[in-house]
Structure formats: C-alpha cells, structure tokens
Amino acid sequence: MRDDLPTPAEPLKIGTRGSPLALWQAHEVRRCLMEAFSLPEAAFEVVVIKVTGDQVQDKALREIGGKGLFTREIEEALLDRGIDIAVHSMKDMPTLQPEGLVLDCYLKRADVRDAFVSPRHGSIAELPLGATVGSSSLRRRAQLALRRPDLKLVEFRGNVQTRMRKLEEGVAEATFLAMAGLTRLGMADVARGAIAPEEMLPAVAQGAIGVERRADDAGVAAMLARVHDAETGLRLAAERAFLLRLDGSCQTPIAGLAVVEGGEVWLRGEILRPDGSASVSGERRGPVDQGATIGRVLAEELLERAGPGFFG
C-alpha cells in the first residue's frame, strides 16, 4: 500500500501494453498525475508488459479468448505487485475485474466515433460493389454487413501502422479505426472521415482510458481520484452495465453510447447477429446516478425483442 506520493527513488510503476497507442495512453496518465501533484517525470516508471492479444496476430480474437487477451498479463502483474497501476483502453476491458482489483478512474473521454480509412475511397457509400473491407472488430463487421451486404469482409488485425501497411498492399480497400486512437497518435488525417454514431454506433467505452488499481491500495486510490473525470465515469457506468447484462465479448456484436445531457444519461444500444443479417436497437434516458440501472434495463429490453438464439 502506498501512503505517500511517489518519488524518483520509489517511482509509481505504470503497467501498459507496448503498442504506440498504449504507450501514449500510459504517458498521458503519467502527465495527468505529474500535473495534479507537481511531480517530476522520474517519479513514475512505465512498465511494458507483453499480452497474448498482441503476440498472436494470425487468429481472430474470438478464436483465442476475447477481450481478456489484452488485459490478463497486466492484471496479473498488478496483483503480484510488479506494477502499481494499469492503463487500459476501456473498449478492450472485460466488464468484471479479477478479485482484488478495482477500475474506478477514467480520464476525460475523447472522440467516440469510428474512422473510415481507405487510400482510394472517401466513404462507405463510395466503396465499389463487392469491395474487400478489413476489420478485427466483430461489431464493425456486423454493422457493415447489415448496411452493405455486398461487401467482402476479412479479418484485419495489428496496430494502426500495420493496418495502414496492409491497405497500401491491397489486402483490403478500406478499414475502420477509432478516431480517438488516430488523434492521440497525431494521425487524424489518415481518416477519410469520422462516422457519426447515428450511422454506426461505436463500441462500448470507445475513446475512454481507464486506470486499474489494487483494491487495498488507499494511497493510489487517493491519487487517482484527483485525475478521474466524473462525467466519463457516469457514461461508462451505463454503457458497461449494458454490456455486462448482454454478456458482451469479442464473440457478440454489441454497440452502445451514453451521453450526459442536463442531469440525465441518454443511452443508445444495438445488438446484431454476427453475420449482420439483423439488428435490434433502442434507447433509454434517466437520472445520471441511475446509469447502471438504465444500462441493464435497456439490455433486457433488447434481449426480449431479439428473442432466444439471436446471436446464433
């Protein structure tokens, strides 16, 4: 348990994946903590941890274990006290944390939208009949198949730089990335355009960075409370409760987005068949402190409307 502020002699260890985007996120958490407590950079140590999801690139995530592939090794290091906090892209996070860990700190959420990326075409509508589109996201693939059943959809994994290279090599005509990730990497100009949520509802928690800690570490809890963004927390409470009730994983196409408007949470949600042959969507509003209930109720409504066996 850390009861005082970190120092260069005893730096706070920040665990992260090693991709350029993951490192940017870890450095942003460090920057926020440095600013909040007037600490030097040397008071923190960024620790890169190899995770299964980054090491296995030749298979779809749903074939090798789903979302936990990007978090398991980092959470093990946190429980083993090899690191003090862990930084995650919230859209990659399972809805439940291992016993002894807590996820209650979020930085201010960035752009939630998907980006359309193509070296030759300006939008989904401009893609020629039968064009090949690459994506590792089952949610994006199902949404695209629903809107453009003529397109050929292929698995497309790797970091931003890898996917851009695949596009240039002609593996696919287009792909989708998160606008937040591109912006954070200084690559927003790579996107031909951002896709409005009304056209393609984003993944639950897209654009949000979360910081995980040990439940018994009161000193770290107090530090993280200073950089936590309350509105992002309210939005994610609704979205993640929605996902939890749906038992969301990389094998179920689910989209959800909550916004805070004048003391209310407005949650929109969508579930799709994996092949994009059907979708069910809905929305609910309610008091900001009832986000989890709103998420659960909307999920139950969509499941009832979809009927048994909807996900196949």
Image (cartoon, helix red, strand yellow):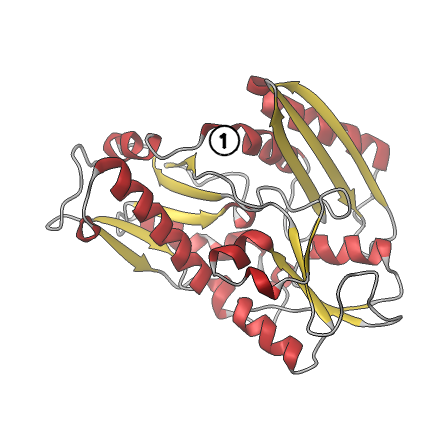
Is 25 rendered above or below residue 163?
Answer: above
Residue ID at (51%, 43%) = 208
- Residue at image position (68%, 30%) is 267
Nearer to the camera, 22 or 168: 168
Q: Residue furthest front?
A: 189
**The N terminus appears in which quarter of the rendering?**
top left
Find residue 274 and report its horizontal and vertical position in percent: 78, 54
Q: Which residue shows up at 16% across the image and 34% down it?
A: 4
In the image, residue 156 above or below residue 45: below
Residue 114 can be seen in this image: yes
- Whether residue 58 is visible to the viewer of this picture, yes or no, is no
Q: Position of residue 145 (x, y in %)?
A: 83, 58
Residue under numbered circle 1: 233
Q: Residue at x 28, y 29 (%)?
A: 222
Above or below, 273 against 239 in this view is: below
Q: Quadrant of residue 284?
A: top right
Determine crowd level at label 1: few under 14, some 14-19, many 20+ residues with C-alpha closer than 10 A: many
Give the x, y percent position of residue 238.
Answer: 60, 29
Q: Is residue 125 left or right of residue 133?
A: right
Determine the secondary structure under disc 1: helix
Image coords of residue 248 (percent x, y)? 65, 43
**Amino acid type at mark 1:** Gly
Side of 6 where 237 appears, left or right: right
